[in-house]
Amino acid sequence: MSKLGYRMILPIAHVSLAVLLLGLGRQVHQPTQIGFPYSPTPTLVCKGISAPAALFSIAVGAVAPFERLDHPPISFSGFAIDDVLFLFGVVILWYLVGLAIDRHRAQRQRERAHNALRIFIDLLLIGLAMVLLLVSFTPILAPKGLTNPTGARIAAILWLTWSLLLFLVPGINLTRMFRSRDSAA
């Protein structure tokens, strides 16, 4: 994703969509046979897409009633105050959703970078284990020419032990990592 991130793109996209749908809803005339307020389909779809923002505008409108019967309705660029509150709620809602997505993506990228480093280190340790394994077999397989064959064999066993440890521990780590990745997918 670009530098803007979802926390910026989602509010812009959803406010644009909401303005479009609210505008389309205004063009629909209320049917004459209905005696109560009619909500056009584009308006209902708009409020459904950002339902928490619709609740926000209703709650703010109930707490701070901006419209009074003795004054004309307040409007901004043709939008009633409840629509403006709704659009403000849309910005907040989709900013928070985008922020959550951005944080989740950043965490996954950090985990991937951490996992890549961990895999590299584990493979490096396994490589070191292989070298130690080769070195440890030399005194065991070819003891002739050694000045201290007993000491060399004891050292070889210790090198072999290190080789096994440096092979098993990273090997187990890699196996767990790949198994957890397979089970998560």
Image: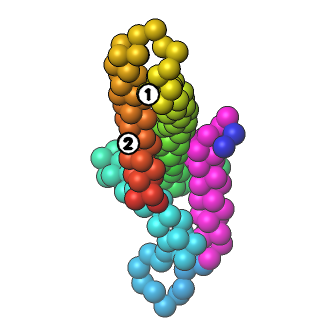
Outermost residue toward the left in this view:
63
Question: Circle 1 is placed at which residue position?
Answer: 140
Q: Quadrant of the N terminus?
A: top right
* Front-most of residues 88 and 144: 144
Q: Which residues are magenta?
A: 3-28
Q: Residues within 10 Å of mark 1 (few under 14, many from 20)?
A: some
Q: Determine whether 106 is above or below 56 in the image.
A: above
Any part of residue 116 in sight: yes
Picture quadrant of residue 184: bottom left
* Front-most of residues 169 and 115: 169
Where is residue 140 drawn, in percent x and y?
Answer: 43, 27
Q: Secondary structure at mark 2?
A: helix
Q: CA distance from mark 1 to mark 2?
A: 27 Å
Where is residue 69 drawn, in percent x and y?
Answer: 40, 56
Outermost residue toward the front in this view:
144
Three-letter code, disc 1: Ile
Where is residue 182 drawn, in percent x and y?
Answer: 45, 57
Q: Determine whether 5 is above or below 148 in the image.
A: below
* Front-most of residues 135 and 64: 135
Any part of residue 128 in sight: no
